[in-house]
Structures are given as structure tokens and as C-alpha cells.
Amino acid sequence: MSALALKGPYWVTVRQYRRTLWLTGALVLLTLAVIGGLRIWDLQTPDVYLQDGYSAPSDENRGFRTLTLAMDYLGLGILFVPLLAGAFVAGPLVAREFESGTYKVSLTQSLSPATWLRAKLLTATAVALLATVALMGAFRIGWSRMAPSGYPSWDPHPYAATGIVHFAYVLAAVAVGALLGQLIRRTLVAMSATGLVMGVALLVMGAYRWSILPVKTVTAPAGPSLWAPGHGLVMETGLLTSSGTRFDRMICWEEASRTPGTDGGGDLWSKIEAQCLARNDVTGQYVDYHPESHFWSTQLIETGVLLALAVLAAFAAFRVLRARHP
Amino acid sequence: MTEDPALTAEGLGKKYGGRGRGWALRGCDFALPAGRICALVGPNGAGKSTLLALAAGLLRPTEGTIGAPAREHLAYVAQDKPLHPRLSVADTLRMGRELNPGRWDSALAKRVVEGGGFSSDTLVRHLSGGQRTRVALALALGKRPGLLLLDEPMADLDPLARHQLMGVLMADAAEHGTTVVMSSHILTELEGACDHLLLLHGGRVRLDGAVDELLAAHTLLTGPVADLAPHTVVESRATGRQLTALIRHEGPVEGPWETSEPSLEDLLLAHLRTTEGAPA
């Protein structure tokens, strides 16, 4: 964070927000130190040997339990980085200039308004991306203990923290913040609006990201539960009739539940369900799943969507600036 | 002193967004010669700040055009003297240097700030109103602008500081031929400092010209009540049979009156008072 090498509007931006920069740096270093420290604490208690070469952390291992907890918070924290970055750009970086009138100073210096906004956004982007990389590094230090390496991590936290999509979220948040900060021009409202937009983007993509690529399906005769091949993501499992149509398992569950004397399951319940399945010609089962290769494909598609949002928002932000300030 | 205009307006109008808000400025035409110290006068809401912000390139005109120098050749000090509150005075001046590469006059900026009675380590947010004005002026002058736009520059200053800063400003403007446009309510601040006058009222230009020409074109007269034709009466007051009037004369003033050339203050007050009630 050496302000000495910086020039022009970059120097001004860094100088103006030096406290935020120091705070960001301190938080990132603290996170790295905490996760590193917990990994060392965790090493103090040997794992319990289970069987077949597998072992698990001992129940006595408070270091591991604390690490698990810390990783939950870190995963959540990483999800919040784009929201924070976007809110900071929208509020203190852009809207406050208009709210407090300091834009009258900034925009009447020798450089163009576009240069001024670009310097702010590039500085914010660089800092947010560096912080994201460092936090993801901390996550990986912890994650290598939580999960076997080499397999995709489908859960939302590791999906964000071990992939590339989150860099695109940060870029989109900075661009959306730049646009909303100018349109709203009120620090707190602009911050909330940007946080809201990016939060909605995260939720919507979280809800629909596994619907982008078509699932693959495996089928097998009825019998022991079928599982997705490799380390794929199971989306749906169910039963098949002999003609290959999908059969709603609930029909037989409900029939069994309706029969008197079966409450709570038991042999009678299983028998009635089995009779029902046989009557309906159920002979097989299926699993819809995303193969491992879909992890990176989905990451790339989602990254593309977010980058498109980032480009559109950035373009609009500079258009608004040009339209208002000749 | 060249006669190329430093600031021109043609059919200039600005209407702010929002329902029910009228024109802040409408149909303004003027050409301000370079090298002048121009007083921009008018009652509150006359459009002075809007005109200065348009000249500074912070606003786009709704209609018409404004011809002002490029961004690097003008400086603007807004009425509320906005500055980044968390930067120190020294940082603010460094900002001036960083954002105006190749033209920043560090010595001049320091000279303006000195005498303010505060250390350059002071954060801007700890400065008093007058001290902020000093820093804002230093930032504007340090840029070595060809056109300096000042919105109510001296309002926050005590008389001593006002006198000193006006001195610095005028000496610098004279030395470099800077054109200054300065809006003000303080008429004494303008007297003797300004050689050009732009009077706005209701968003329109009511008076525009060199101060000496405007003064020479007007006559202050006292005497018996009588018809003042063919002269244009700006303002007249009758007390009994005694008449005091400010007129814009057409040809020599002949009659039983005592005549004198008005002061700038007489002229401004007469115009401000009469336009006060006039339809915009």
C-alpha cells in the first residue's frame, strides 16, 4: 500500500481511503493468521484410525472443531465480499462525492471525469480482487483439511471459494456500485441498493446455477440405492416403470400410510409399499446428476453471465457520467 | 489584455429536473472579455450559482451553449467550498499537484494557505469556514487557471482575511491576466476590484458591461420633480417636491437637477431594487 509509487488520481483515491485500505489489509491478514493458526492447533491431536486406511479427526480435537466453525464463517464472508465491495464503491467512493459536493472539486481539475471515475474503480477493483484472492487462499488452507483434494466442491461456500466465479461477482459489484452510486447520489441508499442487487444476483444464480446445464441420468434395476458416478452432484433420484417412465414414489408411500396399522413404518408398511410398486410395474430406478466436468463448465457459464452484467453496468456508469458532466 | 472573450453564452438556459421546477437560467447571452474581473450580481435564486456551475462544466445546459475554456484552463470554487474532509491541508495541495500535472504552482498555493493560522497537517474537516475558503482558493489558484470562477468566495472570511485574500487574488490576476468571475453579495468587496459587471435576475441577464462604461452611462440626479424623458429611469424616489433618481441617460442631461456619476454600489442597489419587483 505504498502511496509513494502512485500518481495522479490513483494517489488521491488511495490517500483518501487509506483507512479503509489498512482495515481491509488487516482483516485479510487476520483471517490468514486465524486459519493458519487453527490448522497448526488441529495438528496437535492425532486423527483416530477407522478402517481400510481411513481415519477421522478425534472427538477430542478442539482445534478441528474450531477450524470447522471458522471455515463456515470464512465461506460466508467470501460470499459477502462482492456485496461489501459494491456497497463501498456505490457509497463512499461515488455517491458521497455527489452528496457532499466534493465532485465539484474532483471534476474541475485537469483530468476528465472518465479518468477520475476510472481511477476510483480500478483502485477499488484491484483491492477487492487482491482481498478475494487472499481470502480464497485462506479458505484453501482450511479446506484441504475439510475435504479430500481433487474433487469438485458443490456446496455454495466452497463453490464460491474454490472457483473462479467469485472474481466475476466482484467485478460486477464494482460496476453496479459505480452505476447506482451515480444514479442515487445518496451514500446509504446507494450502498443498500447495490448490496440488494448483488445479493439478489447471488441468490438467483445460487438457485438456478444447476439448472443451466442438462443433467445426465443413470438407470439401474430396482434394488440398493443408486448413486451418481464419480463425485458428481445428485440432483434427483426416483423410480422407473418397465416402460421407462418415471414413477412418483409418493403414490405408494401415501397408499401405505393410508392403510390402518402401518403408522410409523414397520414390516406391514414396507409390504404394502412393495405390493403397490409391483402393481404399478416399477422395475428400475434412476439418478439425475451433474458429472464432475459440469463443475468447471458451470463456473465458466456463471462467470460469463456476471462478466456480461459487469460490462453492461460499467458501460452504463460511464455513459451516465458523460451525459451529466460534459 | 486581449479582447477575445473568456466566457460566452448564447441562448443559454438551464432547467433542473423534477416537476414544477422552473428555469434557473433562460435566454442568457453575453461575452465576457478576457482579463476582466467580473462581478456576478443578483438576488438569491437569480441563477448565479447555476451560471458558474455551467461555466465550470459541471452541468450540461438545457438549451443554448456556453463557451468556456477547457477543464485544465479553468478553476472553480463552489459556494460551500467542498473539499475532501479526511485529507490534510498538505494532502489537499498535493492533490492539486497530482491532478494538474505540469501546471501546478506550488509556491503560490502555499502562499495563499499561509497566514491562515493553521498547520498544513490539519485535516480539512477540522478547519473553520474561513480556513476552508483559504484552502479552496489555494487549490483553485495553484492550478494557474485562465478563467477563475468563484461562487461567493469571501462570505466566510473576516474583514482582515478578506482584504488580504482579495489582495492576493487581484495581484495574481493582474500578473497573469487571469479572467475572474466572482459572484458576491458583499457590494463593498466588488467596488474597486471589479471592472466588469453581470447582473442576473430571475435567470436572465439584466445588466452586462464594463463597470466604467456602465457608470458613465448612468447619472444620479437630485432636484425638483419633473419629467425625465427621454432618459430611462432605473429608479426614482420622490420626497415631497424633491426627486432622487438614477437614470440611464440618452444624450446630455439638461434640466434643473444636480447631477453626479453614481458609485457602483448606487448602480447595483438601484437595479437590484427595481428588478426585485419586476416580473422575471
Image (cartoon, helix red, strand yellow):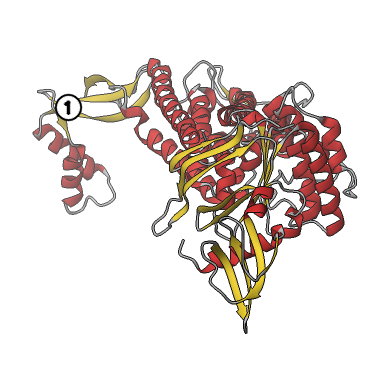
Q: Is residue A6 left or right of residue B213?
A: right
- Number of residues whose C-alpha sits closer than 10 Å to that of mark 1, classed few (under 14), some (14–19) or many (20 or more): many
Q: Position of residue A226 (x, y in %)?
A: 30, 24
Q: Residue furthest bottom?
A: B240
Q: Which residue: 46% across, 41% down?
A: A199
On the image, the x and y values in percent for residue A224 come to 29, 25
**Could you tell me residue B280's position as x and y percent?**
46, 61
Q: Position of residue B233 (x, y in %)?
A: 55, 65
Q: Is residue A282 shown above or below B137?
A: above
**Which is more toward the observer, A260 or A290?**
A290
Name the quarter where the N terminus of chain A is drawn: top right
- Chain under disc 1: A
Tell me what residue is drawn at x 20 percent, y 37 percent. A249
Q: Relative to A306, is B120 above or below? A: below
Task: Kindly state the secondary structure of the residue where label 1 is placed.
Answer: strand
Q: Amino acid at mark 1?
A: Leu
- Residue at left offset 69%, top offset 32%: B146
Looking at the image, how many numbered discs can be counted on the residues? 1
Q: Nearer the viewer, residue A225 or A307?
A: A307
The image quadrant that residue A16 belongs to is top right
Q: Can residue A20 be seen in this snapshot? A: yes
Q: Is residue A158 visible?
A: no
Q: Is residue B57 above or below residue B261?
A: above
Q: Mark 1 highlights which residue?
A: A240
> In terms of depth relative to the viewer, which is nearer, B79 or B249?
B249
